[in-house]
Structure formats: structure tokens, C-alpha cells
Amino acid sequence: MVAQKSAKQLFSVTLRVWRQAGPDASGQFVDYPATGVNPDMSFLELLDVVNDGLTVQGGEPIAFAHDCREGICGTCSCTINGKPHGPGHGIATCQLYMRSFADGDVIVVEPFRARAFPIQKDLVTDRSAFDRIQQAGGFISVRTGAAPDANSILVPKADADLAMDAAACIGCGACAAACKNASAMLFVAAKVSHLGLMPQGQPERNQRVLAMVQTMDEAGFGNCTNQYECSAVCPKNISHDFIARLNRDFFTATLRSAFKPTSAASGGGAG
Amino acid sequence: MAKLDPKIPAGPLADKWRRHKTEIKLVNPANKRKYEVIVVGAGLAGSSAAATLAELGYKVKSFVFHDSPRRAHSIAAQGGINAAKNYQNDGDSVHRLFYDTLKGGDYRAREANVHRLAEVSVNIIDQCAAQGVPFAREYGGLLANRSFGGAQVSRTFYARGQTGQQLLLGAYSALSRMVGAGGVELHTNSEMLDLVLVDGHAKGIIVRDLITGTITRHSADAVILATGGYGNVFNLSTYARQSNATAIWRAYKRGACLANPCYTQIHPTCIPVSGDYQSKLTLMSESLRNDGRIWVPKRKEDAKKDPASIPEADRDYYLERIYPSFGNLAPRDVSSRAAMRMCDEGRGVGETGLGVYLDFANAIKRLGEPAVRERYGNLFDIYHEITAENAYRSPMRIFPAVHYTMGGLWVDYNLMSNIPGLFVLGEANFSDHGANRLGASALMQGLADGYFVIPYTLGDYLAGQKPGARPKNDAAEFKQAEENVSAMTRRFLSNKGKEPVSHFHKRLGKIMWEHCGMARNRAGLEAALQKIPALREEFWANVRVPGSADTLNQSLEQAGRIADFLELGELLCRDALTREESCGGHFREEYQHPDGECKRDDEKFAHVAAWEYQGEGKVPLRNTEPLNYEFTKMSVRSYK
């Protein structure tokens, strides 16, 4: 293995990058040749190098979103050769390494495109719609200091594991960018399933799913037509099975909210 | 000279916090909404503080430079969070967690603060479990635990290898709930660029909107900074690329003391550097050391060989050899230095010789590959993505990297800095970890500060401030601070330099790593104190910042942060030079025992060094706060 790595071949590629000066400007693709590419370099490190070159030559660097560079913060968001997060499987843009490409490749780099993600500049988009969905119901209402002893809430291991599978979502938006309907169902399904699988999440389960789905619709995301492009590009491999769970929860909650008797005193607190 | 009163409550150690809570002043519930509180940063400490203060009824304004609070770098913490729950019945207690943390910090933290941290650790787990954080469970549904570096009990709670992510998403959900309820006004893509003082009290901040470039002024009754650590002064680190010290550094330049900047943590298990284009180092969770065994070849000649071809008899499991009682779980500073010594002896592995093996062959034999996969699968995947190597078949290569900074803004027991009204939480303060932080303690401290300390101690300050008396943001102090920020922006954009910002960051990082990294000495630090000011001068003469001020301009953002690091790095070296002893993460080669362990000097250095800004070009003032150990004996830290 060590021997393999020392035979490293540097190579050249062309980056064909979407440049757009601002939200209302029109954009276009611009080609940037990159030489001396090391296969162990990350894709974002190549963008760093290209940007430093542009700066020195008097150009303006390519704006791109990034932060942790270890696949967990969900900031990085490039569509590479038509696929959100690029050719890898189960990785974010920052975890893509140049060894995935070959000498002479033309690599097309675009922002995540979805109606609810307006472009701010070049490869940077506004994904605050996801925050608004969370603010509508992506939580369990527990006041700090009011919690019972942690082991008084038993969670079957299978449920905790499944909840964790859903909770692994990094909120990057690749699911919506990959979907032809720009649907955010996988994102919403992940949060609804995570909390819905835990006993702590039961009291607000119905109102949560209704509020989150409503906010998702208002933000301009489309509907799911079961193509599963979302889970195919998800950097955390979140399964589209959770969408089925979301649909079940939504259906149940809709029925319950229509027929559930409510107390005349509901909404009032203790006097 | 700054007045540094730690305000540690009187009384027996275990009663201090309880008594303090009952004795400090309260704000009437009807008055809380009349106070506005600014919280900068939305990691564990910032999100938990903003959410909790809003629940109490304060009007909270939360500022974060990320596009969403969920992106803060707490999200990347892998291993776990400590709590003295003693759910495993293995002899843990609040006192033991207190003692381990204090000892782990090499007796350079305040007893009272550390004890409080251990006390509230149990509440944190309760809180997070109630929020729905999907902690690992046993088959009966109870919470699972594991052990972590520097501890002999299993007190670490975890959510696979993504504990920080899940805890942050818990705090983010609490924050989101309060944003939805109108209790928190959330400002994303908003970077704090100056602190505003009115009559000596912190009463506001100046903020740049990173998308539009607009500069705005925000006034408040108190300001809370929870903006993380300054490890990116080394350029290469496990920090997120944009993590920066700008908020704390600009507060320092307004008079807040910066304490113990030389206490930096080098984490032993990171993926080694591969080339000079590198932008970041990736951590492999310390939890790997529970089952992985660390070794290098016994003979130099074997260092370049395929590890599989090196027989057991020719391997040196050096941590197990040198520290038999802690073995591979020795604390981070101890393990990192041991790895460095192996590489210095020429026994380091990999292409650069800067690496040691972390081997799972034994664990796979003992537990089977599926069990190892269940525990560490995501970490093995990360390793594979970065190196294209399969760690189930051959050992990982790891090397230490900068990971955390124990130093930070000085705060008293109430987490208030020496500037009244300025509070500092989480990694941004200096308070609880002494000279070295134990694994799984950062998440604990961030959440302790935000959920369970500041909600009490903020009231004590605000009760002394008249409701509705905060200054207007057209006061002269705000105008002056805004002009300060605008002038710096103009200076960057009109500079006719040639080199990009990253050029200077890389060079600063090299100076810091070479002279102020894992091992430091007088000559090296003195050299760094020559090189850094020279580099800073070159930066201002030759940096090129393209683009304009009124749009998204990442070069401009980065320029401001690196300008601050070029000053902070110098202070870090100055602190390291002045502290003539070795303790925890601060290792001075001149002060070591014959076996290479830290030689502390309690007579001369059992104190906090809190640096006070004296103006541009002037040597800062070194204030000290003595550390009085009333309840614990300061012993020599031994992990053998």
C-alpha cells in the first residue's frame, strides 16, 4: 500500500465553473485550467489553489461554501459533473479527492440548484429554507433544567439505532438539488423520523410533521415522485425509506388533526 | 492594570455552586424581556446559551458567521461527552470526574470551576436525552458508555462517532424552537468585527453581513462571546477552515484579558499531512485508542517496510511499554509527545516518517470485524476516503495535530471577563481545562456553560443594570467602532500587494508549528518573536485582497482573520516564552524530567497568566491570578 502511493502521478484537468456575480446577475461557465494536480489533494484544495492563482493574476476568486472539510458541517455544496457532491458515494464535496479524476478531464462545477436555494454568488446558495423548516417544528419542547433523569426514558436499541441513521443528516441540501422536483422530502423525513422514533418525541409528533411539511411547501420545494435521486446523492446515505415513514406520519397526523377532540381549555396554562 | 477577581464563592468545594446559585441576584420575570443580550457564535456553548436565555424571557440576538447555526464546528466532535452519572457502577462520582479533569489539566485550572463542571455534567445528559439526542443504547434501552483517554471509568456518553453533531443538533433544535417562538432574533452570515464599550461596560458589537457587505451596529445590555478556539493560528489543524479568533482578539484589543494562550492541545490521533496544498488535518476519534494499539517498529531500518512484514517481536507498542497502567489510553498531551519522540528517533512510519501505526488487528481477532465496524465504521470510512487505505486490513497511520486551545479570554467564576457585561463561554474562555483538556470534556464544558451556568450568572450582572438603560447604537462609541472596522476594510482593498492571504497563513502556521508546537524552547520562541512581527509587516505591505466590500468577499473575510492571527501568534509565543515550566499541552524542552515528562514549577507558575493589551506596538502586560489549591494536593501527574 505504501509502495503504491509513492508512484504518484501529477496530472492536469480543466475546471468549468459557474460564475455569477450576485443573486440577480446572469451567470455563465468559465474554464480554468489546473496543472500539477496531486491525486491526494481534495477537490476543495484544488479550488483553493486555483483561487490563489486567480488572486495573484488580478482576477476574482471563485466563491464557494466550505468549512469543516471533513464531511460533517454540511456547508460545502457543489454539483460536480451534474451530480450534487460529485462522483463519489456517501460523501460530501469536501471529501472528494482528485484521485477520482483522470488527466485531461473537464470537470463541470455548479452550485446546488433548487428553487428554494437562490444563488448568492458563484457556487454559494442560500439554504436558510432548511432552518425555517426546523424552526417550525424540528425539536422537542423541553425547557432547560426540566429534564428527568436520562435513564428514566428507555429507548429500545433498535429504535435508537434507526433514529441515529436519520439524525445523521448534515442539512447540506444535496437531496433537493438532485431531485427533479427540488423536493426536500428526504431532509424533512430524516428529522421527522429521528424525533418520531424516540419516546421523547411522541407528544408533539403530529403537530411536528404537519408544521414542518407546511413550511417545506411554503419555501417552494417540490413534491416527491419516488425517483430516489435524493438518497443516491446523500453524503450520509440516508435511506428513502424514511420518506415512507414521513408520509405515514403525515397521513396519520392529518387524520388525527381532523377528528381529534380538543379540550376547551387547551392552550391555557396553569393559573 | 486589569483587576482580576475570580470571585470564587466561599465554603466547602462541593457546596460552592449550590450556595452561589442561592445567593446571587435574580432578575424579576417581568423585567427579563426588557433586557437584550447578544450571543456571538452558535456552537454548543452559544446555541445552548441563546436558547436557554430566551426560554427565561430575555430578548436574545444570536450572531453566527455561518449560513446556519448548525454548521458551527462543535458539529465535528466525534468521541463523546463525559458525565459523572456512574451508570456503570464502576466507581465514578462527581468528585472523581472533578479530580480527573483537574489532574488531566496538570493542576492549572481553578478547583471551584472544575468542580462545578463535574456537578452539572449529570444535568447535561438528562437535558440532551430529553431533547431526543440519539445516544448509544444498550439492549435494555439504557444509555451505553465507553471509556476515554485519561480516565479509568466508563463515563463517556456517545452517539456513534458523531457525538458533537448530535449534541449540536440538540442545542440547535432548542435554539430553532426559540427562534420560531420569537425569543431569539437570528442573524446568520454575520461576523462580529468589533466590541463596543460604553462607560467601560460591553454594550454592543459591530457586525458585517457576509453576503451584502453591510456593516451594522447592535447594542445590548450584555454581550456573550461563544466563538470557539484559536487553533487555526497554526494554519493546519483539525479546526474548520473558517474557525477564527477575530471576536476574542478584537475584544482583547478593547481591554479583555487573554489568559494562558500558550496552552494548546495537540491531538495524538490525526491523519498525517500529505502535501503543501493541504488545508486541514482530519481527526480520528480518540475512542479508537480503546481498541487500537499504537506502535512503531523497534528498529529504524523497518520504518519504511510494509507493516504486515514486521513480526510482533520487532514492534514497539510504546504507550503500553512506557505507561503500563494507562497504556493506549494515556492523555492526549502525553501520547502526542510520545509519538513525536518515536519519530525523532527515526522510527516514524509512512512516506514522510511523521506517523505511527494504530493497529486494529488484535481487536478484529478478539471482537470480530462486524463488532469493530459497528463501533468505528464511520471512522474507518473517513480514513479510507482520505488515504485510499483499508484500515481493516492494514494499520492506520496517525500523527498529532493541533486540535483545541485551552487558553482563551479570562473569565471569573460567573464567566464574566474583566470587562463588565462581557461574558465568554466554551472554548473561547480559559476556565476549566487548565493546561490540557481530557477527551470528551469539551462538549461537557460548552454545554455546561450555556445550559447551566450563564442562565444563573448573567442575572447577577443584569440585576445591577437598569432595565431599558442600554445605550442607543448611534452613541459615539458605536460610530467610532464602526469607523474602526470600515478603515480596516478600506486598507485591505486598497492595498497593492501581490500575495494571496493564504500565503501568509501558511507561513505563520509553519513558524508556529516549528517554534511553538509540540515542544518549545527559549531559542525557538525568541526566533518566532522576531519572525512573526516581520511576517506581519510583510503581510500588510504585500497582501492582495481582490473584490469589493459590498458583496460576498471570502478573501476579505479571510484577510481580517489572518491579520488577527498574525498578532495572536506573537502573544502565544510570548506566553510560552514567559512560562518557564512544562505543564500539560505546554512543553518546554528545558523543563523536563529525565524520562521526558513535564516538569512543572508550582512555586513560580501556579498561576493564570492573563495578558492585557497596551496598544499597538507595545508589549502587553502580564497579569497573574494565583491558583490556590485548597482541597486538592497538587501532585506530579503520572500515568505510569
Image (cartoon, grey):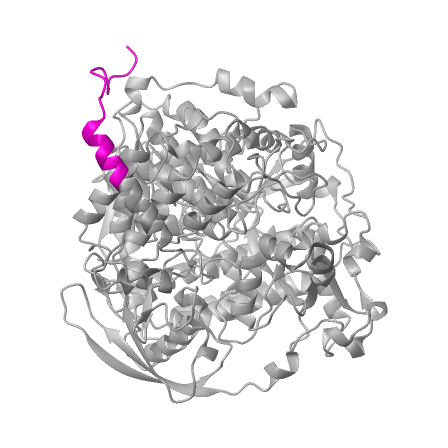
Is any atom of residue B484 visible in this view? no
Residue B190 % position (x, y): 30, 51
Is B176 located above or below residue B614 in the figure?
A: above
Q: Verify whether residue B623 appears in magenta.
A: no
Q: Which of A196 and B259 is in front in this view?
A: A196
Residue B281 % position (x, y): 53, 64
Is any atom of residue B240 visible in this view? yes
How many labels, in total?
A: 0
Residue B4 % position (x, y): 54, 34
Q: Verify whether residue A252 appears in magenta.
A: yes
Q: Quadrant of residue A125?
A: bottom left
| Residue B484 located left or right of residue B107 | left
Q: Which of A142 and B377 is in front in this view?
A: B377
Residue B160 % position (x, y): 54, 49
| Residue B91 located left or right of residue B63 | right
Q: Quadrant of residue B488?
A: bottom left
| Residue A122 located left or right of residue B601 | left
* Residue furthest out toward the top: A271
Q: What stretch is highlighted in magenta?
A: A251-271
Q: Nearer the viewer, residue B99 or B373?
A: B373
Q: Which of B169 and A122 is in front in this view?
A: B169
Which residue appears at 53% of the width and 41% of the height? A157
